[in-house]
Image (spheres, rainbow, N blue to C red):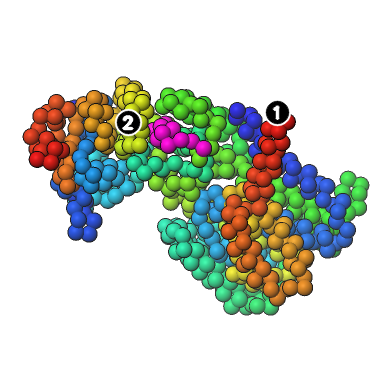
């Protein structure tokens, strides 16, 4: 029983790894690589956000704030103060965790719309600070960020590397790196969900009062998952900054927060692989709809609404339900 | 012998309405103690006060001698109190057995590190929690749902699942809020056996119930509430002969 469960748990991760390995066969140029690398970073962010939104049932409309803080901390620490990337990412994540904990403690007492408003405000405040602190952040014009450097090894999208005797371009190296990051992010998320901690988180969503009477300190777990999802956002924000090489306060903007939430809702709240699909679809969509660029926000809003109405469980859970129903029918027909 | 649960001069007012007023009683360890009374008598309010979901307006509740004022429900669970609900509280986003495993929360020692890397110690704990939860589902009589989603279970089975979850927490005292509501005669008889089995294990049972036959059959003592006040308290025999209770119940 338990064994079968374990296998099904890791099956998704293996499929994801295979897709990431096969994908380069379909990537023709550096632009494609850039796109999928961004997808992987954003997907890892929403895998973290989904722990909060999909599993614990709490909302955050300000998650881009944490993403932005991570991005700027990495940018400023490495660019302005010459820190190595890894300490910058980690210290940034710790700071964001502290901020999320301090902010989360009081606002997670709120529910529903009130929590939405409070998290929205947190996001706005962070975006305003990043816009106004010109001396540190360069203000609305943004700031350049040095290339990522992992233990003295610089990872630049424009570099050239040799790996196992093969010459690979910088953007390909970034793709490999981002893929590994995504797989690790997913693995951690899956481990968290299928654990006593994950059960406590899901019970907060299912019935907070039931959770509390069997001994779950619901306030503690809500803060914990808020902090964990903020750490995901901060680390991915930092990587995003290094990858892009240039950031503006747009990374902390309300639009970005809404993009994250839309990825979660579209892909499937409470489905780790679903939200990855959500990130892929929403990152691809602007490419497909390049002619309607001004309408991008309208499109996102429309997608969010239509998903809520027609696929409240999200894209992947709805698709798997259809497929398994078909298969059952087929099996039934043959029997 | 000190009482396991002791309530003194308990008051709860919602605005101007006194849902519970001046209620005092004591439950000794190992008893089956029932709270009865007409609808709106304040039975569920009393349970919500005892389990920390409501904060009393006045009065005192002691669990094992310790005042429970300002203790959250989860802290009461740590001290051995667990309950079920009249309006069932099942996590429908989880499987049946996960709901019961949730009850093992306090018994499972886990930290973020062992969790994130899913170390063997965590896997072992999870497997034993899974085993224990399956046993408990069997014990309460919903063993056939071990592999099911909670949302696929029948009403009667969910009521049992809630009891299994409470038992998983290894409580000293379990509060059951109308466990027989909505059950048919056969299911109620099975429930009676289950409550007896639980009491025989040495777990103190507090019960809010409307089914008089059930209550009179299994209770050691009863508390009768009416309009938030204590109408009578005593053994089933005493209650049956109490003129106030007869008057209240027969509308005299």
Q: Position of residue A156 (x, y in %)?
A: 81, 61
The residue drawn where x is 65% and y is 78% is: A140
Quarter of the image with the N terminus of chain B is top left
Residue annotated with mark 2 = B172
A311 is higher (above) or lower (below) than B64: below
Looking at the rendered structure, the secondary structure element under dot 2 is: loop
Instruction: Measure the C-alpha gap from mark 1 to mark 2.
Output: 51 Å
Say which element carries label 1: loop
The label nearer to you, 1 versus 2, is 1
Q: Which segment is the magenta one?
A: B152-165
- Left or right placement of residue B232 versus residue A258 in this view: left
Q: Position of residue A165 (x, y in %)?
A: 92, 47
> Which SS type dominates the magenta stretch?
helix
Q: Residue at x 77, y 57 (%)?
A: A36
Residue at image point 39% right, 46% down: A209
Name the residue tied to disc 1: A335
Magenta stretch: includes residue B156:
yes
């Amino acid at each position: 029983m338990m064994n079968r469960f374990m296998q099904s748990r890791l099956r998704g991760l293996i499929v994801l790894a295979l897709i990431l390995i096969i994908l380069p066969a379909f990537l023709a140029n550096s632009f494609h690589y850039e796109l999928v690398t961004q997808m992987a970073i954003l997907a890892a962010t929403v895998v973290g956000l989904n722990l909060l939104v999909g599993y614990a049932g709490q909302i955050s409309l300000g998650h881009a704030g944490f993403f932005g803080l991570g991005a700027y901390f990495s940018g400023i620490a490495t660019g302005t103060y010459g820190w190595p990337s890894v300490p910058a990412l980690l210290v940034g994540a710790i700071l964001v965790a502290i901020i999320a904990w301090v902010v989360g403690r009081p606002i997670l007492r709120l529910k529903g719309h009130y929590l939405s408003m409070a998290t929205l405000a947190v996001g706005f405040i962070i975006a305003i600070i990043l816009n106004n602190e010109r001396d540190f952040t360069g203000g609305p014009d943004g700031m350049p960020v040095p290339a990522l450097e992992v233990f003295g090894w610089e990872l630049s999208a424009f570099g050239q590397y040799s790996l196992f005797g093969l010459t690979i371009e910088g953007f390909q190296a970034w793709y490999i790196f981002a893929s590994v990051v995504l797989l690790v992010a997913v693995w951690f998320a899956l481990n968290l969900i299928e654990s006593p901690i994950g059960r406590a988180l899901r019970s907060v969503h299912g019935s907070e009062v039931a959770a509390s009477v069997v001994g779950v300190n619901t306030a503690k777990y809500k803060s914990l998952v808020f902090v964990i999802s903020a750490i995901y956002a901060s680390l991915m924000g930092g990587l995003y900054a290094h990858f892009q090489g240039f950031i503006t306060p747009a990374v902390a903007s309300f639009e970005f927060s809404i993009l994250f939430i839309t990825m979660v809702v579209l892909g499937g709240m409470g489905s780790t692989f679903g939200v990855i699909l959500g990130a892929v679809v929403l990152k691809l969509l602007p490419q497909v709809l390049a002619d309607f660029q001004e309408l991008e926000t309208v499109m996102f809003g429309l997608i969010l609404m239509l998903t809520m109405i027609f696929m409240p469980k999200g894209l992947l859970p709805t698709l798997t339900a259809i497929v398994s129903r078909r298969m059952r029918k087929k099996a039934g027909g043959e029997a | 012998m000190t009482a396991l649960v002791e309530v003194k001069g308990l008051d709860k007012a919602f605005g101007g309405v006194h849902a519970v007023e001046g209620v005092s009683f004591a439950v000794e360890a190992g008893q089956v103690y029932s709270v009865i009374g007409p609808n709106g008598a304040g039975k569920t309010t009393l349970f919500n006060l005892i389990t920390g979901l409501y904060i009393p307006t006045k009065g005192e509740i002691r669990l094992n001698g310790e005042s429970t004022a300002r203790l959250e429900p989860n802290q009461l669970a740590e001290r051995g109190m667990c309950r079920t609900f009249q309006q069932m509280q099942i996590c429908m986003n989880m499987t049946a057995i996960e709901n019961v495993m949730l009850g093992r929360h306090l018994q499972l020692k886990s930290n973020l590190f062992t969790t994130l890397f899913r170390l063997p110690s965590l896997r072992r704990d999870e497997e034993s929690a899974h085993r224990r939860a399956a046993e408990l589902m069997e014990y309460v009589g919903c063993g056939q749902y071990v592999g099911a989603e909670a949302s696929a279970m029948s009403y009667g089975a969910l009521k049992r699942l809630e009891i299994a979850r409470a038992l998983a927490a290894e409580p000293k005292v379990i509060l059951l809020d109308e466990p027989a509501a909505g059950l048919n005669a056969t299911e109620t008889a099975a429930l009676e056996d289950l409550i007896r089995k639980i009491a025989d294990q040495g777990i103190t049972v507090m019960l809010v119930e409307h089914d008089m036959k059930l209550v009179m059959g299994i209770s050691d003592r009863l508390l009768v509430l009416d309009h938030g006040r204590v109408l009578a308290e005593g053994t089933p025999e005493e209650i049956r002969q109490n003129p106030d209770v007869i008057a209240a119940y027969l509308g005299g």
